[in-house]
Amino acid sequence: MSIERFEKPVYVTKPFLPSLDEFCDNLSEIWDNQWLTNDGPILKRFTRELSNHFESDNICLFNNGTLALQIGLQGMGISGEVITTPFTFVATTHALFWNKIRPIFVDIEPDYYTLDPDKVEAAITPWTSAILAVHVFGHPCRHNALADIARRHNLKLIYDAAHAFGVRIGNKSIVHFGDMNMFSFHATKLYHSIEGGMLSFKNSSLKKTFNYLKNFGFENEVEVVMPGTNAKMNEIQAVMGSMVLKHLDDIIEKRRQITELYRQRLCDVDGITLPRRLPDDITYNYCYMPVEVNEGEFSMSRDELHERLKEYNIFARRYFYPLVCDFPCYRSLAIDTPLTVARAVADSILTLPIYYDLSLDDVQKICDIIIEIGRNKEKEYLRSKKPLEVATGGI
Ligand SMILES: *Cc1c(COP(=O)(O)O)cnc(C)c1O
């Protein structure tokens, strides 16, 4: 190894933390109020801030994204079968399962890894009630095509937008598309409130239902109107969420610089494919840095590169691998459509470190290391061939 390994581990992500002093200052409000959870004053204010940010009253906050999605599906009365993608984080599918909905896995598109609208229609049955698509890595799904299918077949169109905070389509925030969107504010996400989640929705009457469902179904002290659960966001989460929101533009700008540097350095590396650039009308959030590793051209498999990077103290991640449908708990589901693209992508994808505190120098170094690993392997390969060439030459 001619390039030295990183002294400290470089993980795929690292949470953004505002200054401790500022955080403590803001916490004092909680101590003054003596109010920790149950629709507290800070949560109310934070909800208004997000409403203003997104120019929408139709939002509801939760203690995490998974429960937000579970409650969203339940509140909308989704049942039977839902068409979804196997190339996602398991929580997308779990949220269906917890609602006793059967996930119908359909293949993804090769460019942006999102659900392929051209393959959705063939999977619709009399039991289909909705499409649950994922804006994978913040890449918006082909919304118009999906919305058209949903309209023609009378299906609800729901997005797992856990990765898409800050993304805009044209001059509209992505919260305004589809019948419902779920956002995750988990610490590892681009934008976070330690843990947290949000639903945005078209039908304003759903707000009341979601508020019941996240708070045991309480109407008042003595009346419970539906069998809800506990999925409330607390005051400390709201403090963090509100603070991180103020840094959002800065966070996205820093990630844009990191992404551009990765792209510049890796675009010519044989066997490394970068995601296709998004159309001009998309404002992206740069939340992940996925690359595809072509084993033949890079002279080593994705898994080998993943392992070799660890020797340099770089911990990239295989998002998303394996496909959700290949986990033991979902393996018994019959899959009618071939998942050719999803399988190929899951076997070649590697997401590289990207987070606010990652310096551009470190990004340079990560790129140097990837290039060196590839080059060394190529040399090894050529060396291993030499005796054979010599032998052949002798014949
Ligand atoms: C993170 C994530 C979730 C779950 O969100 P939590 O807030 O962690 O519960 C769901 N779907 C996708 C695609 C995610 O990345």
Image (cartoon, rainbow, N blue to C red):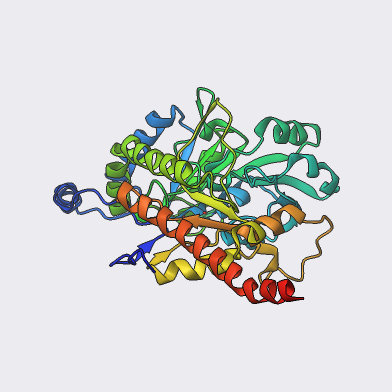
Residue 187, percent from left and from top: 38, 55
Q: Residue at x 31, y 37 (%)?
A: 250
Drawn side of residue 243 relative to residue 370, left or right: left
Quarter where residue 260 is shown: top left
The answer to whether residue 276 is visible is: yes
Instruction: State the residue in front, 280 or 381.
Output: 381
Quarter holding the C terminus? bottom right
Residue 244, percent from left and from top: 30, 44
The answer to whether residue 227 is visible is: no
Residue 107, percent from left and from top: 74, 51
Query: In this picture, is 358 found above or below 375?
Result: above
State the count of labels: 0
* Residue located farthest toward the top when viewing the structure as drawn: 171
Query: In this picture, is 77 found above or below 349?
Result: above
* Residue located farthest toward the front when viewing the structure as drawn: 394
Quarter where residue 188 is shown: bottom left
Quarter where residue 349 is shown: bottom right
Q: Residue at x 39, y 62 (%)?
A: 11
Instruction: State the residue in front, 191 or 225.
Output: 191
Q: Residue at x 77, y 36 (%)?
A: 154
Q: Residue at x 58, y 47 (%)?
A: 136
